[in-house]
């Protein structure tokens, strides 16, 4: 029989996959892979500030990630600097500033290893329930605004011609992504967060024939990556988060090979 912490990690993996499927697919459509990476890296600054101010880290981190995601969505409209440059500036600058702030503390209770890899084997039922509610909310909103979302992120010009409020759709997506990263970063870590948002969706892109199918396949790939990664980590006694990412990477390589063979 598996231990309780393994069961919790498996459930979280399945729930997180349902959340990452639609978000990751949108990121792949819009080529926003570095967008999520920037928010995850910059979140270290939010964690450091919460420790200094002695405020609930989950609340401050969620607010910080949502505010940053909205800011990064709006800045390109008013700036001549390329989006890649803006993301790189925020990513590396905030990460460096967060490390400096932690170094200035007498006894920083947060390590860089914990920030990168999280502690998915130390989950509580409260973490799982919170993630499930967020996943349910994202799923419902995706269903309600599916056509507007799809049109905006595939052809923004077409969406504007049809009267779709593209800016509102983008801000809504930024809020959903920022909230997801803010709520789960301390649990799954920055490495697992960004990898499981991007890799399953990228894998699904080569195995799907429609956007809706891509989201479903991304969820399945993400769930299988969690299951196989946890099992491999348990059997081989290796770090859990990197093993999950390795499993996802293996599925991506397999999807690419399948795509080339079919061609």
Image (cartoon, rainbow, N blue to C red):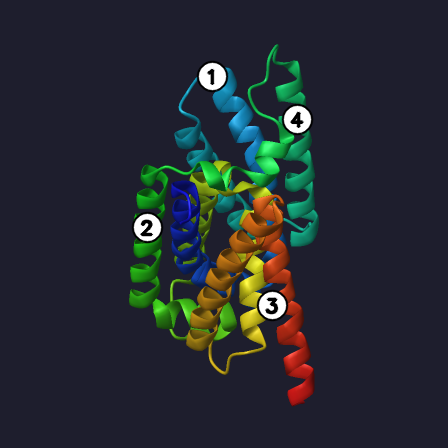
| For discs 2 and 3, the disc positioned in front in the rendered view | 3
| Residue on which disc 3 sits | 251
- Local secondary structure at mark 4: helix
Q: CA distance from mark 3 to mark 4?
A: 34 Å
Q: Earlier in the sequence, mark 4 or mark 1?
A: 1
Q: Earlier in the sequence, mark 1 or mark 3?
A: 1
Q: CA distance from mark 4 to mark 1?
A: 16 Å
Q: Which residue is labeled 2 in the image? A: 132
Which of the 4 image quadrants contains residue 212? bottom left
What residue is shown with label 1? 53
Q: Nearer the viewer, residue 13 or 29?
A: 13
**Label 3, residues with CA under 10 Å away: few <14, some 14-19, many ≥20:** many
Q: Which residue corresponds to the image point at 51% horizontal and 43% vertical from the top-left?
A: 188
- Residue 183 image label: none
Element type where label 1 sits in the image:
helix
Q: Mark 4 touching mark 1, by CB under 8 A?
A: no
CA distance for labels 2 and 1: 29 Å
* Pick the front one: 66 or 21: 21
Per the model, the C-alpha gap separating discs 4 and 2 is 31 Å
Residue drawn at x 69%, y 38% is: 92
- Circle 2 — which element? helix
Circle nearer the N terminus (4, 2): 4
Q: Quadrant of the C terminus?
A: bottom right
Q: Is disc 1 surrounded by few (<14), some (14 to 19) or many (20+) residues within 10 Å?
A: few
Instruction: Rate crowding at label 2 as few (under 14), some (14 to 19) or many (20 or more) other CA atoms within 10 Å.
Output: some
Residue under label 4: 99
Q: Position of residue 193 (x, y in %)?
A: 54, 48
Please tell me whether mark 3 or mark 4 is closer to you in this view: 3
Q: Is residue 177 visible?
A: yes
Discs 4/2, front = 2
């Amino acid at each position: 029989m598996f231990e309780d912490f393994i069961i919790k990690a498996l459930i979280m993996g399945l729930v997180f996959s349902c959340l990452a499927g639609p978000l990751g697919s949108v990121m792949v459509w819009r080529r926003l892979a570095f967008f999520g990476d920037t928010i995850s890296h910059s979140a270290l600054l939010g964690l450091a500030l919460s420790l200094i101010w002695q405020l609930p880290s989950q609340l401050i981190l969620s607010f910080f990630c949502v505010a940053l995601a909205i800011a990064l969505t709006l800045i390109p409209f008013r700036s001549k600097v390329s989006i890649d440059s803006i993301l790189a500036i925020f990513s590396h600058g905030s990460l460096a500033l967060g490390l400096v702030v932690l170094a200035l503390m007498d006894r920083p209770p947060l390590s860089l290893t914990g920030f990168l890899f999280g502690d998915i084997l130390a989950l509580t039922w409260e973490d799982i329930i919170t993630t499930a509610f967020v996943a349910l909310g994202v799923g419902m909103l995706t269903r309600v605004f599916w056509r507007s979302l799809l049109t905006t992120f595939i052809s923004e010009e077409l969406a504007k011609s049809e009267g779709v409020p593209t800016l509102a759709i983008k801000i809504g997506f930024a809020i959903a992504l920022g909230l997801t990263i803010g709520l789960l970063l301390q649990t799954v870590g920055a490495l697992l967060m960004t990898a499981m948002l991007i890799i399953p969706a990228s894998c699904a892109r080569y195995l799907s024939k429609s956007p809706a199918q891509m989201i479903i396949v991304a969820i399945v790939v993400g769930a299988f990556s969690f299951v196989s990664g946890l099992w491999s980590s348990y059997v081989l006694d290796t770090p859990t988060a990197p093993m999950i990412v390795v499993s996802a990477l293996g599925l991506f390589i397999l999807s690419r090979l399948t795509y080339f063979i079919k061609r």
